[in-house]
Amino acid sequence: MIWLKQKTEPLFPDVMWSRPENRRQAGKLLIIGGHGQSFSAVSEAYSAATKAGIGTARVIVPDSLRKTLSQVFPEAEYAISTPIGSLSRKALAELVDAALWADGVLLAGDFGRNSETAVLLENFLERYTGILSLAGDSIDYFLAHPAKLMRRGNTSLVASLGQLQKLASPVLIQQQADLIKVAEQISGWVSQTAVAAMTVRSSQIIVAFGDRLSTTPAKIDAPNPALAACASVWRLQQPEKTFEALTSSTLCL
């Protein structure tokens, strides 16, 4: 494991300097999430992506939120929902079409628990091969059968330690261990997968990809939609420098 420690100064200043200055060249991000009772994750992610310097962001939520959001969040777009308000599997074609427009996709969370939404997300994972970030309860849909997710390239997980522990099974990630031990365990697991992982432990944001790991002090005690959005923006803007981009993104919080 190669462990790099980032403080207030960026570890990779070249990544900072090479970011697009013109919004028209700053990339397109699609944010998906929400259900009939909640949209905070997509709203927070949209706001953070805008602050992080995305060129254009689109948000797709279930149409069960149309009455709630039409006045307070005019940026939202709507896809077919289930009778209980979650995204329906019938929304697949619309989501895939929007994803093809984007340079990257963030599954922001607040999907709720629904078997039809599970089918939708599994099918979306199979159809979309571009840069993908998963956060919040979008990760929960893959805990029981994580193999396809772990083998998928172009994928970042902005996950809690508990989620990583379940994804990594039978590899042991001890939630109660100290920072050094947790970092070692996460790095050992991630090095065997195709994904990048981000989490928070002891007020440090951990980024792991391949055989490299970084830690950055943060004022958050758990992953949140803002962290996921920053990571998504930076990664799609630096697609050839995954580890460097994700590590640098932690400084935008």
Image (spheres, rainbow, N blue to C red):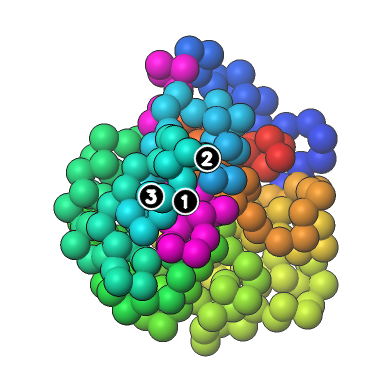
Q: Which mark is residue 68?
A: 1
Circle 3 SS class:
helix
Give the residues drawn in magenta, as a range. Answer: 23-42
Alpha-carbon span between mark 3 and mark 1 = 5 Å
Residue at 17% across, 53% down: 93
Which quadrant is home to the N terminus? bottom right
**Which residue position is annotated with label 2?**
72
**Foreground residue, 210 or 68?**
68
Circles 3 and 1 in contact, beta carbons < 8 Å: yes
> Residue 88 placed where, x, y %?
27, 65
Looking at the image, which residue sits at the far top?
A: 22
203 sits to left or right of 66: right
* Label 1: which secondary element: helix
Residue 115 sits in quarter: bottom left
Residue 38 on the magenta segment: yes
Residue ID at (49%, 28%): 54
State the image coordinates of residue 14 (x, y, percent, origin top left): 61, 23
